Amino acid sequence: MKNLSVLVILILVGAGLFIFSCSQNNSGNDDAADDDSGTDDDNQDEPYIVDTSNSDCKNNSKDNQPDDGIKFEYEDGILTVIHTNVEYNCCLDRVDVQMQLENFVIDLYETEVVSAPCDCLCHYDITTHIANLESGTYAVNIYVYGELSVSGEVEIP
């Protein structure tokens, strides 16, 4: 009788642990891309960067280019932010852009990627497309080398 009681207790404890472990794996954070962020990578309800691109080198003479600036376009639910005339290495591979958004302030952090640097600078336009922004007025700040380069304001209908 004692052996039967111990067996029943072990079965109940095992079943409880199994149920508990299964419920822990169903948290909604599927993190399918396994980027170690711990967040649901398939959740596209939050604002996110759709893609980024950079123009070809416009001209390596600073005398012919105005200071960097910012332009906005909004179409089909996508905000396009164009950072104009920003100076990067002439042998640029690409510019990576990271975004932080808090209280209608969009901070974009540009990082140049150069596999074989050249001894010259060029002006580029960096284009960033952002989706899923709610309606409102946003301040947009663009940082280059960790410092504020340019800022502007845009209304999302």
Image (cartoon, rainbow, N blue to C red):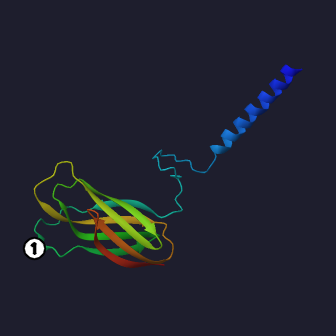
Q: Which residue is mark 1?
A: 63
Q: Quadrant of residue 101?
A: bottom left
User: In the shown orientation, is residue 110 left or right of residue 44?
Assistant: left
User: In the shown orientation, is residue 56 left or right of residue 74?
Assistant: left
- Residue type for callout 1: Asp
Percent across and percent down for residue 91 are 17, 54
Q: Quadrant of residue 121?
A: bottom left
Quadrant of the drawing holding the N terminus: top right
Q: Residue at x 21, y 52 (%)?
A: 114
Q: Quadrant of residue 148?
A: bottom left
Quick one: which residue is furthest to the right in this view?
A: 1
Quick one: which residue is furthest to the front in this view?
A: 2
Percent across and percent down for residue 97 are 34, 60
Q: Residue at x 64, y 46 (%)?
A: 26
Is disc 1 placed on a helix, strand or loop? Answer: helix
Percent across and percent down for residue 64 are 11, 74
17 or 3, which lies in front?
Answer: 3
Looking at the picture, does residue 100 appear above or below residue 134?
above
User: In the shown orientation, is residue 139 left or right of residue 63?
Assistant: right
Looking at the picture, does residue 18 appear above or below residue 134?
above
